[in-house]
Image (spheres, rainbow, N blue to C red):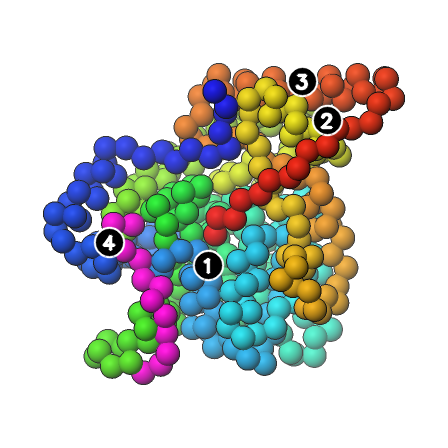
Amino acid sequence: MTVPIADPVLGQAEKERVEAVVDDGQLADGPEVRRFEDEFADFCGTAHGVATSNGTTALHAALHALGIGSGDRVLTTPFSFVATANAVRHCGADVGFVDVDPETYALDADALAARLRESGGDIDAVVVVHLYGLPADVGRLRDLADEHDVALVEDACQAHGATFEGERVGSFGDVGCFSFYPTKNATAGEGGMVVTDDAETADRVRQFVDHGQAADGTHETLGHNFRMTSVAAAIGRVQLDRLPDFTETRRDHARYLTDALADLPVTTPTDPPGRTHVYNQYTVRTDDRAQFREVLADAGVDTAVYYPTPIHQEPAYDGVDVDADLSHAERAANEVVSLPVHPALDRADLDRVVAAVRDYAEESDRQSCSGSGPTTLATRTEGDT
């Protein structure tokens, strides 16, 4: 059997909660959703939570609630799932890109500071992504947003429970956005969440995801049907209870892999002081990704590439003005590969991953000695926001 890159952990508790919702009959946007919103906001340390249908709609609704629209400009990372930038464009705004820190893969705070200084005040918001479950330097990013009077949006779709200096991500921005896709650290089958401390922003998100409907039943603005179902909320509430254990297991697995791979020709993830990495993905770097993935596939170890094409190089972004050096993001896109780290793994699975990476190292040594070139393998990616 293959060691899978992802394997959602669902059990009897989730089944019983879903059965209770089915028996109750309120399958759409009911009390179960309200309870999940309150519990998740409390988990993040924010005053309000608004559930949505997925992480992409959470980003779209959050940006809309902050007033982002036609004529506005939003800066974000080119090294993320395309939904991060798509949400900006769905609001009618222009998107610009800032390069990433080569160690954390998050927005480079120095590069962002320079862009904001040079912008002449024409930047309206910044979307920071906590990629792979590692918090960006969100303390400094918050300071930069305040200094330049721009909104800060946290795309925390891969970072449930991650912390920066003891505070959970999602609580630093004007809004924080999460996804509950099956590959996430906590799943609802599908779903999203916007968290914020601002009541008016929460109300605007709530209206936007429910056809623009206000509390009195009138439709004051245009909106969408971006609501979460009660069935999804039922699963999400149980998963939220289990999330601390999931997180500790992921971190244990990551520590084991990092120690075991220390002498091998791959660059393992960084885990900076003051930040809690929750390892939605355990992502390494290698100079020969095709060969690496081929050897691991032959050993029955699944891998994935998040993400093989920077957003600014996607066909849908032809014609989008790119006025920055994005070389760190472009290099990362050519070198990163994610290994299994999820809670369903056991020690035998982890040892199999390590053995496969050792096979790769030995194969690389043999090819170096023989002078033969690397093999090739088509890169696979999965979109899951």
**Tag 3 near tag 1, CB within 8 Å:** no
Which mark, residue 295? none
Report, in whole angstroms, how far the alpha carbon at label 4 lies from the one at label 1.
Answer: 19 Å
Name the residue type under label 2.
Answer: Pro
Q: Which range of residues does the magenta coloring cover?
A: 220-232
Residue 71's spot in the image, x, y percent?
A: 59, 81
User: Secondary structure beneath disc 3?
Assistant: helix
Circle nearer the N terminus (4, 1): 1
Q: What residue would you read off at disc 2?
A: 265
Q: What residue would you read off at disc 4?
A: 230
Circle nearer the N terminus (1, 2): 1
Report, in whole angstroms, how far the alpha carbon at label 1 lies from the one at label 2.
Answer: 36 Å
Circle nearer the N terminus (3, 1): 1
Magenta span includes 230: yes
Q: What residue would you read off at disc 3?
A: 359
Residue 10's spot in the image, x, y percent?
A: 32, 35
Q: Residue at x 32, y 38 (%)?
A: 242
- Nearer the camera: disc 2 or disc 3: 3
User: Secondary structure beneath disc 2?
Assistant: loop
Q: Main secondary structure of the magenta part?
A: loop
Q: Residue at x 68, y 68 (%)?
A: 320
Circle nearer the N terminus (3, 4): 4
Whether 29 is drawn above or below 166: the answer is below
